[in-house]
Image: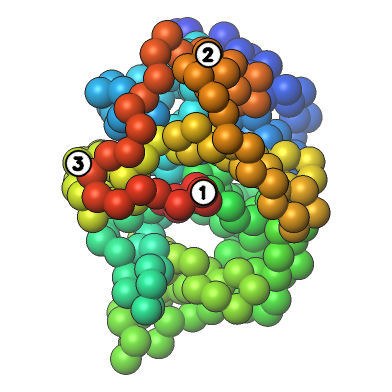
Amino acid sequence: MDPQLPQTIDAYLERIGAPRPARPDAPALRELQLRHLTTVPFENLSIHLGEDIVLEEKALLDKIVAGRRGGFCYELNGAFAVLLRALGFRVTLLQARVHGDGGRLGIPYDHLALRVETDDGTGPWLADVGFGDHAERPLLLDDRTDQQDPRGTFRIARVHAEAGGDHGDVDVLRDGAPQFRLDPRPRALDDFRGGAWYHRTSPDSGFTRAPVCSRFTATGRITLSGRRLLTTVGGERHETRLEGDEEVLAAYREHFGVLLDRLPPEGGVGVEAGLSAPNG
């Protein structure tokens, strides 16, 4: 074990404004997920700034804790898994394929999510701090009924074999719309390198199209895409066009805690991205 890990975990908890939980139970998991979602942004800035993305635990902690940055699913959920394990939770990495337009499934290892077991006899839980606009609370992984969340009604539904559910796959739905298809077999962080490479290089990936930085707020969500600042409050969206590089850099600092010395180029490969954060 890294001898610096205990201090890093303390710094991680400080980063997300969370006290160290007394025990690894379901209420603690809910609190940690919410704190993470509201403090650590979902962002793809490294792709547009030409920064390397390293799927190793120390590198992820260095970026998110010491560097006070965010990341996309592989980075956010990869780091969150390290935090949870250090606090006594039992964590398994799971791969998922994101549902796209027309029911098309994305590539294998499109998304990294977490199966989390607690010590209070509840769960297992599906925890996720890396899917953009998604559930605020962990979801009961084995529950096949509707699960109410401040961000919508979620359901985890079995995928039958004729629909491609050969390994006990399940679809995660939000308000009736499928979000991603989850494979329950355990994975390792190295398994996601191909998916991360695809999403940082392919013109077919939503992450290469435009820089996006987004996080949960108490009342909705705030997203910065290029020079457009979008806030969602109680279901109502408000857009502000930012003028000048300094105003954009200030928005990264003030709304996301991200300190940049230069702006990522606007645009990217393919068409301009929409205002919502990409998922994955």
Provide residue 142's location: percent of width, then percent of height.
59, 70
Say if mark 1 contacts mark 2, CB within 8 Å.
no
Instruction: Identify the mark nearer the N-term, 1 or 3.
Output: 3
Say if mark 1 contacts mark 3, CB within 8 Å.
no
Q: 158 left or right of 52?
A: right
Front-most of residues 7 and 255? 255
Identify the residue position indicated by label 2 in the image. Answer: 246
Q: 109 left or right of 37?
A: left
Instruction: Identify the mark nearer the N-term, 3 or 2.
Output: 3
Type of amino acid at the residue the image marks with label 2: Glu
What residue sits 75% from the left and 30% below the top?
Answer: 21
Q: Which mark is residue 180?
A: none
| Residue 166 is at least partly visible in this image | yes
Identify the residue position indicated by label 1 in the image. Answer: 275
**Distance of label 1 from label 3 (alpha carbons):** 21 Å
- Residue 168 found in image quarter: bottom left
What residue sits 32% from the left and 70% below the top?
Answer: 105
Instruction: Identify the mark nearer the N-term, 1 or 2.
Output: 2
**Relative to 197, residue 12 above or below:** above
Type of amino acid at the residue the image marks with label 3: Thr
Which element carries disc 1, helix, strand or loop?
Answer: loop
Decide: few, some or many residues near mark 3? Use Cα within 10 Å; few <14, some 14-19, many ≥20.
Answer: few
Identify the residue position indicated by label 3 in the image. Answer: 201
Viewer-nearest of discs 1 and 2 = 2
